[in-house]
């Protein structure tokens, strides 16, 4: 079940289109002015999201990047520091927004291949009071950890870091863009995984297929500050119920389908693993991401592989010099996986 135009798009789960049910609910959504708090569909989405996260309140944001940025701005003041992993999305892919717009200083500690950060590094990152030091306010952990293979981060780990940071008065933000993938993979609930977090962002627009939007959850007091910052950033969205309607379907109907994407990622990885010259870059997939590398001694050039796939209506995304990330999602079916394995197999054998 590729897209209507026949394209099989592995570049990300951000490329997903809304489902038919989403489009229908968008067409008939009740709306109001959300800046006045009067959009019933947005209000329902915020309330349902808060319940799903086990938090007091939630806020609809335009994107995951905006949700993370608002969280950092709500937790930190100018000159404060936020600790995060070297492979964290906030460090790698959010345009330096926390520094550019918030004056927040990123304190990096190495991300391990399993997506966690070493607990000793985590402990050592907390600075003692000293006139030379910035105030450490926040720790950001990503779940699933995208650049480390889409690895889910366990509740045990979340508890260990919260036991380190909370006594030191440092808050914990979860970039849970794919928290429901993590919950499915770990056979638990999103609520359980984020119970130690002070704030959490998740995306409606990735594997959950909504066309736009992310949710930021936290305490009532935190979300009311976050709401004001969203307005300050120009993110007050008026009749946003049109898009929130799709978000409600994403939340209620799509989270339970994610295990299919994970099964397909495993199937796909197995097929790719058997191809001469393809190396699984980050091991067996644990959620919906398959990272591969073209072996250094294989003559295939990455640009050529991209083109050969494109000629067959398959879009693939490069994640390094000879590296690729394939993301499985609702719009990729078993036959699309089979077709892609065969296209790559033929290309590599040529
Ligand atoms: N990730 C995108 C790209 O930005 C890399 C992708 O294709 O995976 N947190 C995490 C962990 C993410 O993976 C992303 C998007 C975001 C935040 C930002 O979400 P959006 O794209 O809605 O701003």
Image: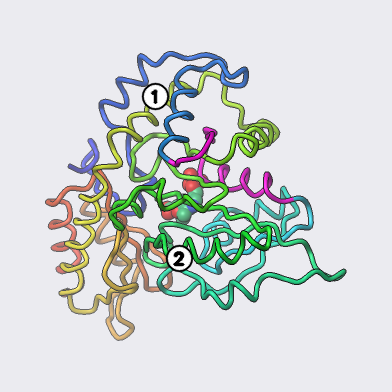
Q: Hey, which quadrant is residue 279 in on the image?
A: bottom left
In the drawing, what numbered circle is on residue 157? Answer: 2
Could you say where residue 265 lies in the image, as x and y percent from the top left?
Answer: 23, 59
Of residue 192 and residue 174, the one placed in the foreground of this image is 192
Q: Report the quarter where the N terminus lies.
A: top left
Q: Position of residue 111 (x, y in %)?
A: 50, 71
Which mark's residue is nearer the viewer, 2 or 1? 2
Magenta residues (range)? 53-76
Give coordinates of residue 166: x percent, y percent: 62, 59
Within the image, what quadrant is residue 164 found in?
bottom right
Q: Residue furthest bottom?
A: 297
Element type where label 1 sits in the image: helix
- Is the CB of mark 1 within 8 Å of ligand 1? no
Q: In which quarter of the image is residue 103?
A: bottom right
The colouring scheme, among rainbow, by chain, secondary structure or one colour, is rainbow
Asked if residue 289 is positioned above or below residue 67 in the image, the reply reads below
Q: Is residue 207 above or below residue 115?
A: above
Name which of mark 2 and mark 1 comes first in the sequence: 2
Q: Which residue is drawn at 24% across and 40% down?
A: 3
- Residue tagged 1: 245
């Amino acid at each position: 079940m590729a897209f209507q135009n026949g394209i099989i798009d592995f570049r990300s789960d951000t490329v997903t289109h809304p489902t038919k049910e989403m489009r229908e609910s968008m067409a008939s959504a009740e709306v109001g002015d959300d800046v006045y708090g009067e959009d019933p569909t947005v209000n329902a989405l915020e309330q349902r999201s808060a319940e799903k996260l086990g938090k007091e309140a939630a806020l609809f944001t335009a994107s995951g990047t905006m949700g993370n940025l608002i969280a950092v701005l709500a937790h930190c003041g100018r000159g404060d520091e936020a600790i995060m992993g070297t492979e964290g999305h906030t460090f790698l892919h959010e345009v330096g927004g926390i520094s550019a717009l918030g004056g927040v200083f990123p304190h990096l500690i190495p991300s391990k291949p399993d997506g966690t950060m070493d607990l000793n590094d985590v402990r050592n990152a907390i600075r003692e009071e000293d006139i030379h030091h910035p105030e450490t306010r926040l720790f950001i952990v990503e779940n699933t950890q995208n650049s480390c293979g889409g690895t889910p981060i366990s509740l045990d780990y979340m508890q260990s870091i919260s036991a380190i940071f909370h006594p030191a008065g440092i808050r914990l933000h979860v970039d849970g863009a794919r928290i429901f993938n993590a919950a499915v993979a770990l056979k638990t609930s999103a609520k359980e995984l984020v119970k130690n977090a002070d704030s959490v962002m998740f995306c409606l627009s990735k594997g959950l297929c909504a066309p736009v939007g992310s949710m930021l959850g936290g305490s009532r007091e935190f979300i009311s500050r976050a709401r004001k910052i969203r307005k300050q950033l120009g993110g007050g969205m008026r009749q946003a119920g049109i898009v929130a309607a799709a978000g409600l379907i994403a939340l209620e109907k799509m989270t339970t389908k994610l295990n299919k994407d994970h099964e397909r990622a495993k199937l796909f990885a197995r097929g790719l693993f058997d191809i001469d010259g393809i190396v699984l870059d980050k091991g067996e997939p644990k959620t919906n991401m398959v990272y591969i590398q073209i072996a250094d001694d294989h003559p295939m050039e990455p640009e050529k592989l991209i083109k050969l796939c494109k000629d067959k209506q398959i879009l693939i995304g490069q994640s390094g010099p000879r590296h690729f990330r394939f993301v499985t999602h609702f719009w990729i079916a078993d036959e699309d996986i089979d077709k892609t394995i065969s296209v790559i197999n033929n290309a590599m054998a040529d």
